[in-house]
Amino acid sequence: MLNLFQDLESFDMKKPKPFLHNRLSKEELKALREAESFARRTISFYRYVNIEQPEKLRDELFLKWSEFGCLGRIYIAKEGINAQMNVPEPHWEAFVAHLYGYDYFREVPFKVAVEEPGHSFYKLTIKVKHKIVADGLDDESFDPSNTGDYVTAREMNQAIEEGATIVDMRNHYESEIGHFEKAICPDADTFKEELPKVLEDLKGKENEKVVMYCTGGIRCEKASAFLKHHGFKRVYHLKGGIIDYAHQVEAEGLESKFRGKNFVFDNRVGERITPDVISECHQCGEKCDRHVNCGNHACHLLFIQCEKCEQRLDGQYCCTKCHDFDHLPEAEKRALRKGPAKDDCLAVYKSRLRPNLKDMKQ
């Protein structure tokens, strides 16, 4: 198959590529990335637009972006595209020209990673979805195009200083490690779950100025229209989200009113925006904002762990039971997985379960 990770000079851009999905293991993908001799640019972008044949578009993009050596996670639906990906620098201009060649995506703005991207993605995944963000909304019941007005970084700072209602439209594990000053951070695990919580939290503020924000802007695009549908008169959202805000702050010499890290949905997990550490290790309570996944893949819980607890537990494990389970012979692990999930370490956690790791046997 096409080796997406060889030196780009050896790419044959004209040769047809037969595969429409990744065929390498995670270990192989990581090794190939380590051997690369070129830089990558990590970006995100989205656009709500009517796509008539998302399946056909998906295959076209996969073939072309494979030729460019692009990696990432892209969702396509009849309502548009939502992409987080990295692009080899030598093919950046060709990638942009190809993307903008579609009327769907002409001049779509890119959000470029704040920190040195490192190994943000290892493979290219493009999926056709019902929606580009799972929101649980019936779009036929309101006008999704009737969105709130954008605010810039400077205007965001002014809104905070003037006492506007600031709403974080991200999940709890995202806002836990970083958020804007005085922001309402709903205790929700999914965007679908958060929308009704926001309505409840904002009850009585229908005539007040409400400014929403999220990682790159896509969730606020739909949420602002949702609020206006429910009678909110002065709805705004941060253009380009936290990612673009950080770039504007640096370019204009503004004070950052976002504190901590910005959670990102790739292998980096987070980008540092300010030196502030506003969260705690879920195991010992020390100041920490490092997200990890439990090393026991039968658990895979996303949690915050400091380096001391990692050393104490001999790895990135949420508890000693997961450590012990992960070190069993493979045959014994397979047998246990077939049985009922009586122990915490035998069932994949969803974030909504949120076990209190301080209370678990460590």
Image (tube, grey):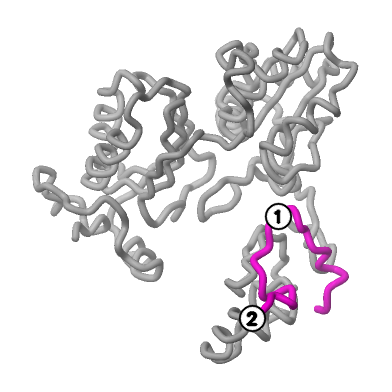
Helix, strand or loop at disc 1?
Answer: helix
Q: How many marks?
A: 2
Residue ID at (77%, 30%): 196
In the image, residue 123 above or below residue 169: below
Give how far across and how far down residue 205 sits, in percent.
Answer: 86, 16
In the image, residue 25 above or below residue 322: above
Front position in the image: 186 or 80: 80
Residue ID at (60%, 79%): 337
Residue ID at (66%, 60%): 302
Give how far across and how far down residue 306 sits, in percent.
Answer: 72, 66
Left or right, residue 109 beside residue 308: left
Q: In the rendered image, is residue 276 in sight? A: no
C-alpha span from label 1 to label 2: 23 Å
| Quadrant housing the N terminus | bottom left
Q: Which residues are magenta?
A: 340-362
Tell me if residue 110 is in the magenta stretch: no
The residue pinned by badge 1 equals: 351
The residue pinned by badge 2 equals: 339
Helix, strand or loop at disc 2?
Answer: loop
Front position in the image: 285 or 28: 28
Front position in the image: 293 or 37: 293
Of pointers 1 and 2, the one earlier in the residue sequence: 2
Which kind of residue does numbered mark 1 sit on? Answer: Ser
